[in-house]
């Protein structure tokens, strides 16, 4: 699927979905007051998102 000159595959979409899932975890950890866990998951989400962008 081509959107804006970029070729998206099911793998790309799955990687971005994992990044969104991890961001939801960050929100959950922040609401529970677990700041260190939220920071760790935020770093993981950033790595997954970066991997998805690099895969494009």
Image: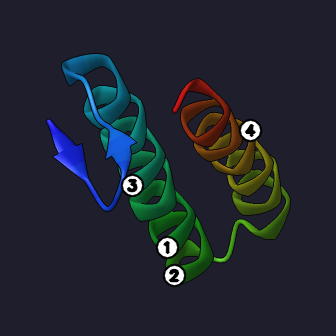
What distance separates the C-alpha of mark 2 from that of mark 4? 22 Å
Disc 1 and disc 2 in contact, CB within 8 angstroms:
yes
Q: Residue at x 41, y 30 (%)?
A: 15
What distance separates the C-alpha of mark 3 from that of mark 2? 17 Å
Q: Which mark is residue 47?
A: 4
Determine which residue is flagged by label 1. 27
Disc 4 and disc 3 in contact, CB within 8 angstroms:
no
Q: Residue 7: x, y in percent?
A: 32, 34
What distance separates the C-alpha of mark 1 from that of mark 3? 11 Å
Q: Residue at x 51, y 81 (%)?
A: 31
User: Which of the two labelled residues, at mark 4 and mark 1, occupies the earlier sequence position?
Assistant: 1
Q: Residue at x 28, y 28 (%)?
A: 14
Q: Which mark is residue 20?
A: 3
What distance separates the C-alpha of mark 1 from that of mark 2? 6 Å
Which circle, 4 or 1, is nearer the viewer? 4
Q: Residue 47: x, y in percent?
A: 74, 38
Determine which residue is flagged by label 2. 31
């Amino acid at each position: 699927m081509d959107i804006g000159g970029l070729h998206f595959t099911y793998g790309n979409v799955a990687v971005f979905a994992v990044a969104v899932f991890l961001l939801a975890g960050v929100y959950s950890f922040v609401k529970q007051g677990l700041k260190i866990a939220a920071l760790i998951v935020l770093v993981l989400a950033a790595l997954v998102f970066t991997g998805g962008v690099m895969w494009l």
